[in-house]
């Protein structure tokens, strides 16, 4: 009975850690892309669910560090029982059961098989990573100087959030639809480009908060605030440009530029700590709404406004970089 009680305690520990991990998904509440659901499009919900399946499909047992598990006086058969129970503790299992009850077994099996597939990919990636030496063969390129180093750091931190992958899913699904040969509305590429920009626009609110405690290093570095913001803005814009180039580069890029301008205030004065492999946690009311309005207003009208409107957007962005860079220097000098 003592061993069974120990197994129950271990299962309870895994359940608590899993629940804490699920609560971290609450960062989705501050994601600007949620405003796209006002259109009532179920396709966006499916893409969002597909991206969320990646963190949800992680093994609950891995939430407990391996070093700690090895130090516990637990027999192998006890761990096997905990392993079997952890399958039911997985959020994917809960989601699959709920969809089975609500929509039928096909929907439940689709979600469960998708989660199993993502889990297999994660395990394969981990096995491959363990066999690769510390000198990783593929590195993110960077420009020279401090600006280039900050840009590379920004790319690394951004790629550890779910926002860019949602944006990529939007772009990729549109390109696949084009290849199918089915008719596509001429306005669709511009709309999707703006949605791609919207998917990563929340990063405009957390340019400094995304570094976590690492942001404190900027206060110690002999570098002006405008250079920090310039590097981070350029990193975000370059990533956005890559994603919207197959769709509508001008509308997507300048829409994203407008969202960055609106988000500069929160980046400097209200940095929010972020969690890896979660959606960026911003402030939806009112900053997220203001970002969305600015993004859509500029993105829809920038082509008709021509060079003059583009020049105004670049000028306003430049002023915001120097202004908030100066405010950063004053605050932390």
Image (spheres, rainbow, N blue to C red):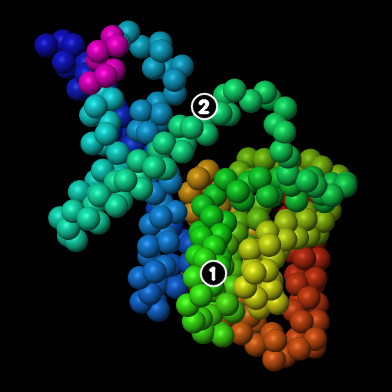
- Residue under circle 1? 179
Residue 302 higher or lower than 331, as above or below: below
Residue 306 location in percent, x, y? Answer: 76, 88
Disc 1 versus disc 2: nearer the observer = 1
Residue 73 higher or lower than 108, as above or below: above
Q: Is residue 162 visible?
A: yes
Q: Residues within 10 Å of mark 1 (few under 14, many from 20)?
A: few
Q: Residues within 10 Å of mark 2 (few under 14, many from 20)?
A: few
Indicate whether residue 77 is drawn in magenta: yes
Residue 249 location in percent, x, y? Answer: 69, 73
Q: Secondary structure at mark 1?
A: helix
**Left or right of residue 281, residue 312 in this image:** right
Q: Which residues are magenta?
A: 75-81
- Residue under circle 2? 127
Residue 136 higher or lower than 303, as above or below: above
Indicate whether residue 153 is drawn in magenta: no
Q: Main secondary structure of the magenta part?
A: helix
Q: Is residue 174 visible?
A: no
Query: Which residue is drawn at the image coordinates 69% and 65% (left, top)?
Result: 241
Q: Residue furthest front?
A: 181
Q: Residue furthest left?
A: 1
Q: Residue 308: name its quadrant.
A: bottom right
């Amino acid at each position: 009975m003592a061993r069974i009680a120990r197994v129950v305690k271990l299962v309870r520990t895994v359940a608590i850690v899993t629940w804490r991990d699920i609560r971290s998904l609450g960062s989705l509440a501050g994601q600007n892309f949620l405003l796209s659901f006002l259109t009532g499009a179920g396709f966006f919900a499916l893409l969002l669910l597909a991206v969320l399946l990646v963190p949800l499909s992680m093994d609950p047992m891995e939430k407990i560090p391996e070093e700690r598990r090895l130090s516990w006086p637990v027999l192998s058969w006890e761990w096997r029982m905990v392993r079997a129970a952890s399958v039911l503790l997985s959020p994917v299992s809960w989601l699959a059961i709920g969809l089975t009850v609500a929509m039928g077994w096909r929907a439940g099996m689709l979600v469960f098989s998708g989660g199993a597939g993502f889990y297999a990919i994660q395990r394969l990636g981990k096995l491959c990573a363990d066999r690769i030496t510390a000198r990783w063969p593929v590195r993110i390129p960077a420009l020279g100087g401090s600006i280039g180093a900050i840009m590379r750091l920004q790319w690394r931190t951004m790629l550890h959030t779910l926002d860019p992958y949602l944006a990529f899913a939007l772009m990729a699904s549109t390109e696949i639809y084009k290849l199918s040969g089915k008719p596509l509305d001429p306005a669709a590429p511009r709309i999707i480009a703006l949605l791609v920009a919207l998917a990563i626009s929340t990063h405009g609110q957390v340019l400094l908060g995304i570094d976590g405690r690492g942001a404190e290093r900027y206060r110690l570095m002999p570098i002006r605030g405008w250079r920090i913001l310039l590097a981070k803005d350029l990193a975000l814009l370059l990533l956005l440009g890559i994603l919207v180039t197959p769709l509508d580069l001008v509308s997507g890029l300048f829409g994203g530029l407008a969202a960055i301008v609106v988000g500069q205030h929160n980046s400097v004065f209200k940095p929010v700590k972020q969690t890896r492999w979660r959606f960026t946690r911003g402030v939806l009311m009112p900053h997220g709404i203001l970002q969305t309005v600015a993004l859509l207003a500029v993105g829809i009208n920038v082509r008709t406004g021509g060079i003059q409107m583009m020049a105004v957007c670049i000028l306003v962005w430049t002023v915001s970089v120097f202004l908030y860079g100066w405010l950063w220097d004053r605050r932390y000098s």
